[in-house]
Image: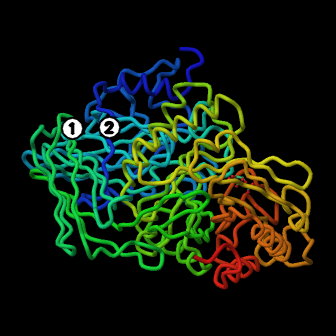
Amino acid sequence: MRGFGFAAAVMIVAGAVGAGAQAPVVLTGADVRPATSLNGDWHVIPDPYQTGLRDFHGHELTRGWFANEKAKPGDTGPIDYDFSKAATIKVPGDWNTQRPEFFWYEGLMWYERDFEYTAKAGDRVFLHVGAANYRSLFWVNGKKVCEHEGGFTAFNCEVTGALKAGGNFVVAAVDNTRHEDAVPTTQTDWWNYGGLTRAVSLIEVPERFIDQYDVHLSRTEPGVIEGWVHVAGGKAGDKVEVAIAELHAIGEGVLDEQGRAKFLTVSSNLERWSPEHPKLYRVAIQAGADTVTDQIGFRTIEVKGSEILLNGKPVFLRGVSVHAEAPYRTGRANSDKDAETLLGWAKELGCNFVRLAHYPHDETMLRAADRMGLMVWSENPVYWAVQFDKPEVYAKAERQLQEEIGTSRNHAAIVLWSMANETPINDARTKFITGLATRARELDPTRLITAALLVRAEGTTKIVDDPLGAALDVIGTNEYIGWYEQHPETADKTDWRIAYDKPLIMSEFGADAKAGLHGGDNDRWTEEYQANVYRHQLGMLNRIGQLRGMSPWILMDFRSPRRPLAGVQDEFNRKGLISDQGEKKKAFGVLQEAYTKGTVGKAE
Ligand code: GCU
């Protein structure tokens, strides 16, 4: 067993401590299904030596120490733990920002909570986990129900056979240890918030249920709403129906051998979704005894040469990048309030677009973007130097992409699926990410594929000719003229050469500034310096003919262990236009003026 990382050991141990668990499944619209919330206080026990998974010689336990029955009366051996006496933290929520002793903790954490359940005949029940960073295992009443890898996508574990009427308990083992063979890998510029960072609930579905569905406006047939519905356990010939009452529109389909039915319906008076008019419709998807009622907007997004067309018209994406960092309290954003605060600041800035970096964000954020009218760049966390030469790492990246698209595919706000950020240029990486782009198009041909590329320079000319660009619909690229390189004024004499006749989004630029630190335009770390960088950047960007959008880095300061400069950073990346305490910096006003007066980008 030498050399196996936690993953292998836990996966094997997981098998040992309760083999037979099903693989987790994707449920589209899980957040709009009726559910029994398991949010709230959970007992937690940190376990840095993985004592709950292996014995004192390091061998895997055949009975997971924490995972099986809680200490039974009359047990003879010593039980060195008791969940009922352990500390509690809130779920959803990272553990780092809930208890000071967990702030820097990176390792295995055990969670436990009791819950009452009244089983209903014929139903199947899934444990819905909005996200668990990074690897996780789950047991219900001591029976293992699933394991998952990936810190930012929702998954659902069937628990039907583990539940009982009355009192139940659920145990989770969540480990946020970074690994070279993970996605993302060990190096990131954000805090490695661990734990059950998004909502947890129980979802009941009939024996045969709708697990995934896609409802969108046809790009080619005006007024046609089309898509498909997949029914888990569905039988060929079973009927499905998609009804939009407000439009008096009903689409019907018949399941094929794979349990999937296509449908279409026509509407002559459909109001298209846009940032200016974020119209959402109540859509009822019904198959047999199962119905999902979702809120869906209808729009088209496509490219034509170097233009991005929203509903057939050229659009400029006036954006800003956003990490899932909670305003004020910091930690992982996970609530409607967090989303409305962050996206409210983006709207105040004059944005019609947000780059939700560098991983899929919570459904609360996507629902808020749908409601508030913000187009979204959603990103798979293939960030920096992932191990592109390993097929098992590709499988992890593809599975996270499938969970991201399968969960969030009906949000009108999402217009771009981003495959990666700032990955090193080599053949293995280009093959890896091109594979992801191909898979994304198979999963969802209705959206645009992009990635944030690195750029090279020849003198004062920036050149975007990364071979990965061939696989993208929209080219994203990051540059930091005036911060990591040269001076703010260098932007004035910088030209750009783009090797592709495709839309370009400047997906990052910016500078650090501590809110309230003031000085001259050339005094680094001051608000004035950051504002100066923005002014020179905007002048340069306006000279890039095929620029179709931008998402400066970044809306709000966010925690990162890479940023220790005492008294200025204090483990925060300070490139926010707003501080983590909501203080707007001078650069906020510079960008806000450019967006609201239309002095940047072609006003559509
Ligand atoms: C990179 C990276 C970001 C990072 C930023 C910075 O471009 O994509 O994740 O935070 O630069 O250095 O601030």
Q: Is residue 107 above or below residue 501?
A: above
| Ligand 1 placement by image quarter | bottom right
Q: Which residue appears at 72% of the width and 55% of the height?
A: 478
- Give x and y (percent) for residue 56: 51, 21
Examine the rendering and report whether any part of residue 86 can be seen: no
Q: Is residue 415 above or below residue 538?
A: above
The answer to whether 37 appears left or right of 399 in the picture is left
Count residues near mark 2 (Cα–Cα under 10 Å), then give few for <14, some for 14-19, many for 20+: many
- Give x and y (percent) for residue 13: 42, 24
Q: Which residue appears at 86% of the width and 63% of the height?
A: 482
Q: Which residue is mark 1?
A: 162
Q: Which of the pair 589/513 is nearer the observer?
A: 589
The answer to whether 334 appears left or right of 231 in the picture is right
Q: In the structure shown, which secondary structural element does the residue marked by tag 1 occupy?
A: loop
Numbered label tally: 2
Q: Which of the pair 487/201 is nearer the observer?
A: 487
Q: Which residue appears at 41% of the width and 22% of the height?
A: 61
The answer to whether 121 appears left or right of 228 in the picture is left
CB contact under 8 Å: marks 1 and 2: yes
Q: Quadrant of residue 80?
A: top left
Q: Is mark 1 within 8 Å of ligand 1?
A: no
Q: Amino acid at mark 2?
A: Trp
Q: Which of the pair 532/186 is nearer the observer?
A: 532
Q: Is residue 545 above or below residue 30?
A: below
Q: Which residue is mark 2?
A: 139
Q: Is residue 96 above or below residue 177?
A: below
